[in-house]
Amino acid sequence: MRPTRRHFLQGGAAVVATPAFAESDRATDPLTLWFRQPAAQWTEALPLGNGRLGAMVFGGLGEERIQINEATLWGGGPHDYTNPQAHDRLAQLRELIFSGRIAEAEKLSAEMMGQPALLMPYQSFCDLRLSFDGAAPAADYRRSLSLDEAVAAVSYDSNGVRFHREVMVSHPDQILAIRLTADQHGQQNLSVRLDSPQPGAVTESAGKNGLRLTGQIQPRQNPASSWSGSWNQPGLRYAATVRVQADGGTVVAGDRSIEVRNADAVTILFSGATSFRSYKDIEGDAALRAEAFLNGDSSKSYRALRARHIADHQSLFRRVELKLGPDTGAATPTDVRISAAKTSDDPGLAALYFQFGRYLLIASSRPGGQPANLQGLWNERLLPPWGSKWTTNINLQMNYWLAESGALWEALQPLWSLISDLQVTGAQTARVHYGARGWVLHHNTDLWRATTPVDGAWGHWPMGAVWLANQMWDHYRFCLDEGFLQTQAYPAMRGAVQFVLDFLVEAPAGTPFAGKLVTNPSFSPENTYLLNGQKGQLTYGASMDLELIGALFDSFAQASRRLNSDTALRDAVLQAKDRLPPMQIGSRGQLQEWIEDYPEFEPDHRHVSHLWALYPGHGISPARTPKFAAAARRSLELRGDAGTGWAKAWKIALWARLLEGDHAHLLLRSQLAESTLPNMFDTHPPFQIDGNFGAAAAIAEMLLQSDDDVVSLLPALPSAWPQGKVRGLRARGGVRVDMEWANGQLIQAALASDSERKIVARNGGRSVGLTLHSGRPLRLGADLSPEV
């Protein structure tokens, strides 16, 4: 008879152990992904992470594969990417672009790329493999991932025994832990191995119950088609250690494996590290660091490790709750629900997707670590798609939209640290490539903090720093943290402003807006236009550039006044702002993407860069700029609703900003049905995590929007979600928002502020001025009137 709770010997040691929560409790848990079969491929495995170590759990029967990443394991090494001859060609490049000789300009731009012109790829670390003896056919199989606990589990019956497996990656203890139990004594018989796809990796025994894997990234020549650079020197060192502890039975370590026989339960602890100290220093001791992580936890019981891990995770994850009506699909396997999304609406799946996005952000971005890259933290390849780098013309920024509304500000710390480093390398690029002050960033960076133009002509998009500086200002608008503004955001904004002032040039006579200040070279990521029947990418004064710069100039002026700093620089910014070309409406009624109304080579292109001012910016809104909002809407219609996973995510948010909830929901359904893999990862295709983060942020945007002191409740609520409730969303101004609605109408809300402030609350056609007091939630009725 299967036990329904844990059984412990006197003193607490497990004799016959079962899951920490009964499996029947999981069957209808709205915060659990679950499946009836093991993962057949990597994009079906379940992700775990602590911001540094990432793991993909397959849940196999005869063999369990846990594929592992370490966030600082990259190809290449410390490197200065700048190209000393780039600045000598800048004037000629600008002249060619202004004169419409785009093919010549793009050919010349190849001489101005960073050295090398391809950046380094994120790497797979190793695989932890468990091989189970005499695996018999299994019944009642269940594989799951609890978003609330950040624990992956596998349970099944075999030969009359109920087996249970748990895997977690702890942030407090910086290790991966596995617990194997069964409902009968002596049933654990398995071997444990470590291997790696890295050439030259070596595995050896480490004591009576351990294994050690060590190696160093070897020189590699990668094909240009991989969008990854090559390197000719050894790079980062890496090390991993595994220790196996058994309750009963025996544990014997061989040369390349550990054998466990007749144990009642088994705990496996894994630690890994690299020699990375900073983007300039890779001389750390990887093996010593890996051992140190593990030595600190070897005396802790699995139960204690699990409790610390869950408490840490839930302190972040439980800040926000979301229900979009009754979750009737929770008892259906997740992959089946995703497949069914093609033909039926599933509000509970949308809520699960939102929380999965928050889960992934917690797992892939924690203080002290690296930011979430194109695949977050998870990658099984030596040549991942696009190098799994940080692409800074939308993808990196999209990764962090959810951190604001989703109340995960700690997850932003790795991004701020990256920006701090990029200000150093970006200042070098600004000086060498443009003869400019401040700092610049183009459309990609890697572990070595590259900031130069890379990849191709389209790499000459020098607006990455401007976008990231705008994102830092927007974070300040959310949190109102004066310390963050003064010490982190303002220096980045100031440096970006200095670069822009030096980079802008006057449009010459004979061009539209002659005498106005424009960017050159410029590019509208990653689109192509037609000029005289020829394709072109490089241009001048692309709409996105001007939107980003206009927003930065406004925010810098506000920040410098608030800090009573840089009066002369502020005056120069305001003068330059008045000389920027305005947004334009094209011949088809669309918001114009380029400074001239060029036809598009690819009308349904995945990027909608020129709509930045609508979202995530605030330069366009239906209320304040109805003419431009209508033009943005027309641009979306012309682009169409199809696209890659991340592109759909952006469009969902754009339609939400246009207050068209049903159209936003239509695209969300497409996201779930067509751009979501069986394990709920977003697919570009292939897998890219930005769509997960972007679509989750867009769901929040459907429910809550804010700008300065205005908080809009349920601004784009779709008819498919007639009832629901949310707790803990964040609005600009340091405001936390709880809401409940039914029949498509607000029932009640509660607003709480971190400080005393006046706001305007909106819902439907109502607007009410309110005063919020620090630490005192203000409860509102359906008509927004405060409840006594």
Image (spheres, rainbow, N blue to C red):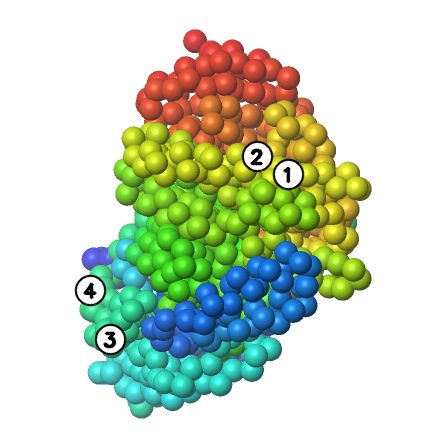
**What residue type is disc 2 on?**
Gly
What percent of the width, then of the height, locates residue 199?
42, 87
Q: CA distance from mark 4 to mark 2?
A: 51 Å
In the image, 763 versus 540, the foreground residue is 540
Residue at x 77% of width, y 38% of height: 589
Residue at x 31% of width, y 79% of height: 237
* N-term-proximal mark, 4 vs 2: 4
* N-term-proximal mark, 1 vs 4: 4
Instruction: Sort mark 1 into few (<14), some (14-19) or many (20+) by Cα contacts within 10 Å.
Output: many
> Is 422 left, or right, of 616 in this rendering?
left
> Is 65 left, or right, of 604 in this rendering?
left
Tell me, yes or no, if residue 190 can be seen here.
no
What percent of the width, then of the height, locates residue 521?
56, 57
Instruction: Sort mark 4 into few (<14), some (14-19) or many (20+) by Cα contacts within 10 Å.
Output: few
Q: CA distance from mark 3 to mark 2?
A: 46 Å
Residue receiving disc 4: 296
What percent of the width, then of the height, locates residue 69?
41, 69
Residue at x 22% of width, y 83% of height: 207
* N-term-proximal mark, 2 vs 1: 1
Instruction: Sort mark 2 into few (<14), some (14-19) or many (20+) by Cα contacts within 10 Å.
Output: some
Q: Which mark is residue 583?
A: 1
* Residue 142, quarter of picture: bottom right
Q: CA distance from mark 3 to mark 1?
A: 50 Å
Q: CA distance from mark 2 to mark 1?
A: 10 Å
What percent of the width, then of the height, locates residue 751?
44, 23
Residue receiving disc 2: 619
**What residue type is disc 3 on?**
Glu
In the image, 320 versus 629, the foreground residue is 629
